[in-house]
Image (cartoon, rainbow, N blue to C red):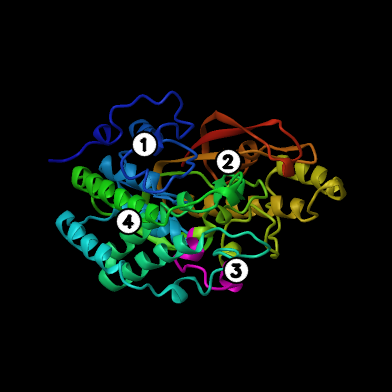
């Protein structure tokens, strides 16, 4: 029997769809904790309120797959783009169909195989030296016995499973990595736990948590497999490049990275290295360079800002005049290039969007040297120049600015709705 969106969201009431409050408790969404810019209910709202019947929906910044997964439950064909290979696999793992009996059988074989000696060297030889005890300068992310259990499971998964089952088991294992490590991850990146040196992590915790994760995932898959739409299109790569090949669609719902000088790949750095997506500093650099220009944590050539926004021109003048006060002299160039990137993405979407189709995006402001960058207003100005009409611009929530952004002023996050 077909499972509805309301059954998946468990009939909950979300006070503000501008937060992901409660979303981590939903089936599939708890496979890997993820700070969403919006709740799944926003996608439902966008589809219901669309003047045009929505059959296809685009998310050019796939993240953890919230838009795509919600679309499947709502009977809409999702097209998703994601540049981070770990997140792309997370999305595909959630959207795929499985045989639960096969999963249970394969997992039993993986558990038995993981009791054997692992190929520890192959798994961890290319990770940075800080990852495994003894680490560097007395600091490491994983105690050696814990790392050995992780390696044992990765070795077993590579040996036993293949295809979508192989991907799923790796993703579920990735969901426990931080819990068995000596570090914590927040929106500001990675830091060591308080008194981590005194903390003992039983290697058997890896076994228990992984088994719990797989069992819960099989329950999720079994209960929610019959969605209104079971198909999807996932493109791995830089949306600034691959969107040009996108088919026509009726709606776009997404949240791009914010121009806050933070490299979001840092949040997934542990998974990227342990699962082998990154193999050396060069691959790390290439991934950073393929992300939207929203940070200054990798040296790159910055695109010139678009010339069609007076608001942007004014804020860039102020940022350039305050360049000497900034922790990075590249920040004004980054901000200009960010709007160049976003202008290109929005323009490409406009070309593929059907008549009367809508674009819903959640964006966040920034602040440097006390200068407020009103991202929402600038993007609205740029979008209107492309031919969009502005249907709605609603404050979503506020976020604290980081120390790097020069203070603790609340910065706005805004929902923008544009119509072609």
**Mark 3 near mark 1, Cβ–Cβ under 8 Å?**
no
Quickly name the residue at label 4.
93
The correct choice, above or below, for 395 with respect to 373 in the image is above
Quickly name the residue at label 1.
25
Mark with earlier residue (3, 1): 1
Picture coordinates of residue 391, whole percent (x, y) = 49, 31
Front residue of 190/253: it is 190
Residue 129: numbered disc: 3
User: Which picture quadrant has residue 252?
Assistant: top left
Marks 2 and 3, how far apart in space? Answer: 50 Å
Q: Which residues are magenta?
A: 271-284
**Mark 4 near mark 1, Cβ–Cβ under 8 Å?**
no
Picture coordinates of residue 245, whole percent (x, y) = 42, 63
Marks 2 and 1, how far apart in space? Answer: 38 Å
In the structure shown, which secondary structural element does the residue marked by tag 3 occupy? loop
In the rendered image, is residue 13 in sight? yes
Marks 4 and 1, how far apart in space? Answer: 18 Å
Q: Nearer the viewer, mark 3 or mark 1?
A: 3
Mark with earlier residue (2, 3): 3
Mark with earlier residue (2, 4): 4
User: Which picture quadrant has residue 89?
Assistant: bottom left
Front residue of 127/152: it is 152
Quickly name the residue at label 2.
384
Is 278 included in the stretch rendered in magenta? yes
């Amino acid at each position: 029997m077909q499972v509805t969106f309301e059954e998946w969201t468990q009939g909950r009431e979300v006070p503000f769809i501008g937060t992901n409050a409660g979303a981590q408790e939903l089936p599939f969404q708890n496979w890997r904790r993820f700070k969403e810019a919006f709740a799944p209910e926003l996608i439902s709202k966008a589809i219901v309120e669309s003047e045009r019947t929505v059959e296809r929906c685009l998310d050019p910044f796939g993240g953890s797959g919230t838009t795509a997964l919600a679309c499947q439950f709502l009977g809409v064909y999702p097209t998703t783009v994601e540049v981070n290979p770990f997140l792309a696999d997370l999305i595909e793992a959630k959207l795929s169909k499985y045989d639960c009996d096969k999963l249970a059988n394969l997992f039993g074989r993986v558990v038995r195989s993981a009791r054997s000696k692992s190929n520890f060297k192959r798994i961890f030889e290319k990770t940075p030296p800080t990852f495994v005890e003894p680490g560097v300068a007395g600091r490491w992310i994983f105690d050696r016995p814990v790392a050995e259990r992780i390696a044992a499971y990765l070795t077993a998964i590579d040996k036993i499973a293949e295809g979508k089952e192989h991907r799923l088991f790796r993703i579920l294992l990735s969901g426990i990595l931080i819990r068995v490590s000596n570090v914590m991850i927040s929106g500001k990146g990675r830091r060591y736990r308080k008194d981590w040196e005194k903390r003992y992590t039983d290697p058997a915790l890896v076994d228990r948590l992984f088994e719990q994760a797989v069992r819960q995932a099989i329950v999720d898959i079994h209960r929610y497999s019959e969605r209104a739409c079971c198909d999807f299109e996932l493109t791995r790569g830089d949306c600034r490049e691959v969107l040009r090949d996108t088919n026509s669609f009726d709606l776009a719902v997404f949240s791009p990275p914010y121009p806050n000088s933070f490299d979001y790949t840092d949040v997934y750095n542990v998974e990227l290295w342990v699962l082998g997506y990154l193999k050396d500093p060069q691959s790390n650099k290439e991934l950073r360079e393929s992300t939207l220009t929203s940070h200054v944590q990798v040296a790159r050539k910055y695109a010139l800002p678009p010339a069609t926004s007076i608001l942007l021109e004014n804020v860039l003048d102020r940022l350039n005049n305050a360049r000497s006060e900034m922790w990075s002299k590249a920040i004004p160039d980054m901000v200009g290039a960010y709007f160049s990137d976003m202008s290109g993405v929005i323009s490409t979407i406009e070309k593929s969007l059907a008549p009367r189709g809508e674009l819903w995006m959640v964006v966040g402001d920034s602040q440097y040297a006390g200068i407020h960058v009103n991202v929402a207003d600038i993007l609205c100005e740029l979008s209107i120049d492309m031919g969009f009409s502005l249907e709605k611009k609603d404050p979503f929530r506020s976020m604290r600015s980081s120390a790097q952004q020069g203070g603790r002023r609340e910065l706005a996050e805004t929902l923008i709705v544009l119509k072609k």
